[in-house]
């Protein structure tokens, strides 16, 4: 077990999300703080735009040759922050 420094924080989250997190913690016999910490760590490890990067990589490498300029422009113009 790690002896890393811990810091108490305060935040506001949706009631439903909190209820789901508490339920998960109870089912897995873990503390709520550990469930939240693991979820946040997983999110941060994914990095910004990771899914978009993987999708673009798959699109670029799925062809036997070069992509047409139109497809390259389409990828570059996509708003990666759009929902």
Image: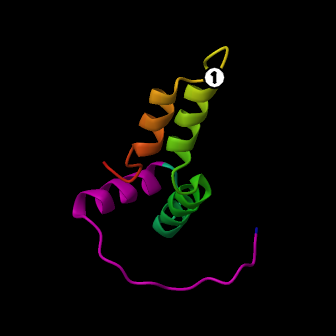
Residue closest to the eye, 32 or 12: 12
Q: Is residue 41 magenta?
A: no
Q: Residue at x 47, y 43 (%)?
A: 76
**Disc 1 designates what residue?**
66
Residue 77's place in the image compared with 15, above or below, is above
Residue closest to the eye, 77 or 43: 77
Q: Residue at x 45, y 48 (%)?
A: 27
- Snapshot colouring: rainbow
Q: Is residue 9 magenta?
A: yes
Residue 34, percent from left and from top? 54, 65
Residue 15, percent from left and from top? 23, 64
Q: Left or right: 39 with respect to 65?
A: left
Residue 32's place in the image compared with 42, above or below, is below
Q: Residue at x 62, y 57 (%)?
A: 45
Range of the magenta residues?
2-27
Q: Residue at x 46, y 56 (%)?
A: 25
């Amino acid at each position: 077990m790690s002896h890393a420094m811990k810091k108490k924080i305060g935040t506001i989250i949706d009631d439903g999300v909190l209820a789901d997190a508490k339920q998960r913690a109870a089912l897995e016999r873990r503390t709520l703080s550990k469930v939240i910490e693991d979820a946040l760590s997983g999110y941060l490890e994914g990095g910004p735009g990771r899914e978009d990067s993987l999708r673009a990589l798959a699109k670029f490498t799925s062809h036997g040759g070069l992509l047409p300029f139109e497809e390259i422009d389409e990828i570059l113009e996509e708003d990666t922050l759009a929902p």
